Amino acid sequence: ERESQVETDDGLLMVFTSGTTGQPKGALLSHRNIIHSSLIEADTFESTPDDVYLNNMPINHVGGAIVAGSTPIVSASTMVLLAKFSPTKTLQLIEQEGVSVLGQIPTQYTMEFNVPDYDKYDKSSLRVVHFGGSMPPKTTLRKVHASMCENMFNCLGMTEAAGIVSYTPKGASIEVLSKSVGKGIPEVEWKLVDKKRRPVRRGEVGEIAYRGSTIIKEYYKLPQATAEAIDDEGWFYAGDLFYEDENGLLIFMGRKHDMFITGGENVYPAEVEKAISSYEKVQTVAVVPVKDDVYGEIGCAYIIPKPGYTMEEEEITTFLKAKLAKYKIPKKFIFREALPLNATGKVDKKMLKKKIAEEIQALSS
C-alpha cells in the first residue's frame, strides 16, 4: 500500500513546554512552522555558509532543536554541537571552532564570565550574539558588548512559535536590549489584548497573541488546552504581558500568571526583577508572591549575589527606592548561593513558591 503524502502542515516535531503554569504540554510543530522559523532567523542574522553556530542548548527544546539546530541547516552553515552545557567548554569551542553565531540565556553568559581566565579565550570570531529565555541585565549586556561581540540581539523565543517570534532591531542600544524584545517577525501577526481579548491602546499592558506561519495549530491530544490557547481565527494567546512603546517596540512586563496584587495594586515581577538586577552586586534574581494578612500578597525576592559579594536587605531596599514605587518593592528578601532551574534553564518559580510556602508554614506551626 502506498504511503500517504506528507504535507507541509503535518506534524514534524513535538516539543514540550516548560510547564511554568502547569503540566508541560506537547506543542506539535509542523514542517511549515520549523522551516519558516529557521529561514526567518537565518535572514535576521544574515547567516551564510561561512558561519559557525554553537549549539549548547537542550535539543529537547526549541532553542537547541530549531534556533541553533535547524537554522544552520537552512543557511548551509556549520553547527558545533555540545552534548551538555559547560561554560569552560563553550569558551574553548568559540576559540577552537571560530564560532560566529552564539545564542544563550543570560545565565549562561554570566557563568562564562565567572570562568577563571575568561579573558584569555579568543572570542573575536563572534559576529552575532543573541539572548533569550529571560531579560538580560545591563551588566551582562555591557560585559558581552565589551568582551564578546558588539552585534547583539534580544529575542523572545516560544515553544509554540517554533523558536524566536520577535527580535530587537539591529544596532539596538543596551537600554533597549535590557527592556525590550523588539518587533514581531515577518509572516507572523501580533496584537495585545485585555482580559476579554479586546485590543488595548499603545502604552497599555496586555496579553500578546500571535497568528502566522510559525505558530502551532494544537497541543497534542489536549483539545481543551488547545481551545483555551488558540481561538477560532487562529490567534494563539501566549500568556506573556507587554506594552508597545512610542517606537513600536514590545516591552516585556512578565507572565500573566506571575502578576500579583498587593494592597490593590498590580505588581509585575519582571519589572521588579529588572530593577533588582541593575544593582551591581546581583547575579540572579527571581520575585514571587507570598500570601500576607495585610496586603493580600507581598513580593519575595530570591537573590544570588555575584561571587565575592554579600548583601543586606536594607541596602537593596534603599537602592530600590530610587527605582520603583514603594508598593512594588519586595517586603521579603532571601539570599541564596543557587536557585532551582527548570529544563530550559529558567528559574523554577513554581518550586520557589512551594519553598517559601513551606517555610512560612513551618514558622507558624
Image (spheres, helix red, strand yellow):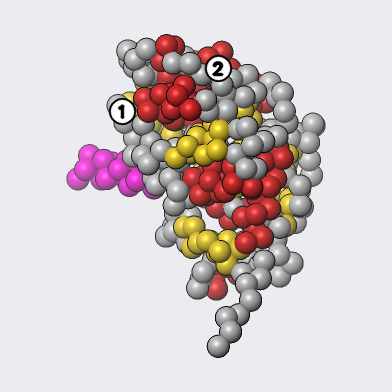
Of pointers 2 and 1, the one earlier in the residue sequence: 2
Please tell me whether mark 2 sits on a helix, a strand or a loop: loop
Q: Which residue is labeled 1 in the image? A: 336
Compare residues 201 and 173 and report the one nearer the observer: 173
Main secondary-structure element of the magenta-colored stretch: helix
The magenta stretch is 350-365
Q: Residue at the spot x=67%, y=66% of the render?
A: 8
Residue 223, position in %: x, y?
55, 73
What label does residue 124 carry, if any? 2
Amino acid of disc 1: Arg
Q: Residue at the spot x=72%, y=40% of the render?
A: 43
Can you see residue 161? Answer: yes
Which residue occupies the extreme bottom position in the image?
A: 1
Can you see residue 327? Answer: no
Q: Nearer the viewer, mark 2 or mark 1?
A: 2
Amino acid of disc 2: Ser
Quadrant in which the C terminus appears: top left
What label does residue 241 carry, if any? none
Residue 281, position in %: x, y?
42, 15
Quadrant of the rendered structure where residue 3 is? bottom right
Instruction: Determine contact: label 2, label 1, CB under 8 Å.
Output: no
